[in-house]
Amino acid sequence: MPFDCKFDVYMMGRFVVVEAWEEMAQAGASLGVIKPDVFACQYLTDADYPFLSRWLLLFYGVTITELYTIPNGLDFSPRRKVLPTPR
């Protein structure tokens, strides 16, 4: 990963844990687990931008930290990609 890669980190409330976890699984995310009731994570990378990735870090089954790695120079806004714009 390049040194100038940007990280965007967000905390998700416990009310969206199941939905976010299932969304990533359906998208074909890779899974890493240290101990299921302590820590697990899912991650996806973009085929067109290999250093663009989305991670879900699950702590104790109730708290998700969402992390994006964004290559320098790529115009990418994680929140707009994840949440639909109200019409």
Image: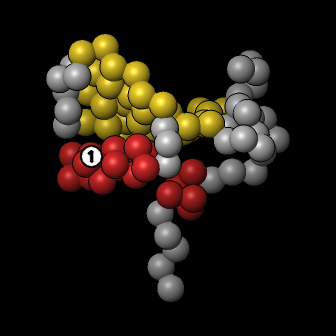
Residue matched to label 1: 17
Q: Foreground: 75 or 39?
A: 39
Q: Quadrant of residue 32?
A: top left
Residue farthest to the bottom? 87
Return the x and y of residue 79 as percentages of the image width and height: 52, 55
Query: Is 17 above or below relative to 51?
Result: below
Tell me if residue 9 comes above or below residue 4 in the rendering. below
Q: Is residue 36 above or below residue 73?
A: above
- Viewer-side residue, 74 vs 61: 61
Residue type pointed to by label 1: Val
Q: Is residue 79 visible?
A: yes
Is 75 on the left or on the right of 22, as rendered?
Answer: right
* Helix, strand or loop status at disc 1: helix
Q: Which residue sits at x=42%, y=28%?
A: 31
Q: Where's the N terminus, which quadrant? A: top right
Q: Position of residue 54 (x, y in %)?
A: 54, 39
At 75% from the left and 51% from the top, the residue drawn is 75
Pick whichever, 81 or 30, lies toward us.
30
In the rendering, at what x and y percent does residue 40 appear? Answer: 32, 25
Q: Residues within 10 Å of mark 1 (few under 14, many from 20)?
A: some
Residues 68 and 37: in front is 37
The structure's colour scheme is secondary structure
Give x and y (percent) for residue 3: 74, 18
